[in-house]
């Protein structure tokens, strides 16, 4: 069943909408799409929209907050087992074709402040980030019930793409000014992009990708979230909310339980997915009740498990 934006927003803010959503999160498993295609499945069947899943129609907004590097990806070596490439950040990457769908970087462009200053322009604002013609079309879609989504770089994930996980975590202690400057630069650009986007079409949902945790827990603790992520999150959320956003959605794999309070203090209203492989997963219902108990308080933040389809 298709949910329109009004019903979906109400549901994500714990208003009564009749029932819970019944939806798939990630689509077919690796290899299943190709198998279904060989068996003659339609495009709607592969997208799962032919089945009775609930989903909301989405309009990702044409305001680009990501890195604009000007670099062209290229393949260096390809075998049946792996592919070695250079990606749009200039990183040499390797994809193990039998077991993965995402190539892993073998090197990173930033190790020091001087390295960052050489690539800082990737994240600075320019009018080329705004596709006004596409935004006019997205306004029409919103009027038809589509949910407008503004994607922004992750406060953990984007520095991780530039530095790697180990160097990023060390830099929080040894070069905190480097991480702060990265996030200030990205945050300022996000604000300028959203201001221009909102001149044409209101923003319904602010969405951020982090993937900052594994089975044993997150790579940033509460102290790092408060010091680095909170100023960035609050800057972009305040802007998005001023331009109509009702949902601030964070996507992070793994066990985020130890930092839920810290993440909510940043303004996030929706955390997903909740992984069954993470330790403590049976506590999901208890955690949901704990964080949603205060939803009637206007100043409360809520841990929202109702946002599985963005």
Image (cartoon, helix red, strand yellow):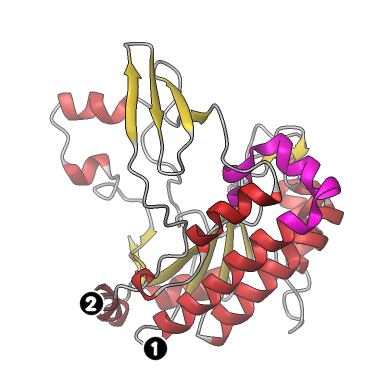
Image quadrant occupied by the C terminus: bottom left
Residue 164 in the magenta stretch? The answer is yes
Residue 263 can be seen, yes or no: no
Q: How many marks?
A: 2
Dividing the picture into quadrants, the one containing residue 13 is bottom right
Q: Tell me: residue 107, above or below residue 147.
A: above
Report the predominant secondary structure element of the magenta stretch.
Answer: helix
Provide the secondary structure element on which disc 1 rests: loop
Residue 289 location in percent, x, y?
Answer: 75, 60
The front one of 250 and 75 is 75
Look at 66% across and 50% down and name the residue there.
Answer: 114
Judge whether residue 263 is colored magenta.
no
Q: Visible in this render: residue 225?
A: yes
Which residue is located at x 50 percent, y 54 percent?
Answer: 308
**Residue 178: horizontal and vertical position, in percent?**
73, 55
Quadrant of residue 169 within the rendered picture: top right
Q: Position of residue 299 (x, y in %)?
A: 76, 82
> What residue is disc 2 on?
133
Separation (CA) of disc 1 from disc 2: 13 Å
Q: Earlier in the sequence, mark 1 or mark 2?
A: 2
**Can you identify the residue that label 1 sits on?**
199
- Image coords of residue 307 (percent x, y): 53, 59
Q: Secondary structure at mark 2?
A: helix
Residue found at the far left of this picture: 40
The answer to which of 169 and 3 lies nearer the viewer is 169
């Amino acid at each position: 069943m298709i949910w329109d934006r009004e019903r979906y927003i109400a549901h994500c803010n714990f208003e009564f909408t009749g029932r819970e959503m019944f939806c798939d999160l990630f689509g077919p498993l690796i290899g299943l799409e190709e198998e279904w295609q060989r068996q003659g499945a339609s495009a709607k069947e592969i997208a799962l929209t032919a089945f009775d899943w609930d989903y909301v129609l989405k309009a990702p907004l044409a305001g680009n907050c990501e890195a604009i590097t000007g670099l062209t990806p290229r393949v260096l070596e390809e075998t049946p087992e792996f592919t070695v490439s250079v990606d749009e950040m200039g990183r040499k990457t390797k994809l193990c074709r039998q077991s993965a769908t995402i190539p892993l970087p073998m090197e990173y462009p930033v190790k020091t402040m001087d390295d960052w200053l050489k690539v800082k322009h990737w994240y600075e604002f320019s009018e080329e980030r705004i596709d006004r013609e596409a935004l006019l079309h997205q306004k029409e879609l919103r009027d038809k019930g589509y949910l407008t989504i503004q994607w922004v770089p992750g406060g953990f994930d984007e520095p991780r793409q530039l530095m790697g996980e180990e160097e990023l975590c060390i830099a929080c202690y040894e070069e905190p000014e480097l991480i702060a400057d990265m996030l200030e630069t990205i945050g300022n650009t996000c604000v300028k992009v959203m201001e221009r986007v909102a001149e044409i079409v209101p923003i319904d949902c602010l969405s951020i990708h982090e993937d900052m945790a594994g089975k044993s827990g997150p790579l940033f603790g509460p102290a790092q979230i408060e010091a680095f992520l909170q100023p960035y999150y609050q800057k972009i959320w305040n802007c998005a909310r001023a331009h109509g956003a009702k949902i601030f959605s964070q996507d992070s794999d793994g066990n985020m339980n130890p930092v839920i309070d810290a993440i909510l203090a940043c303004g996030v209203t929706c955390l997903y997915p909740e992984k069954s492989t993470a330790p403590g997963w049976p506590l999901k219902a208890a955690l949901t009740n704990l964080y949603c108990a205060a939803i009637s308080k206007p100043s409360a933040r809520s841990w929202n498990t109702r946002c599985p389809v963005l």
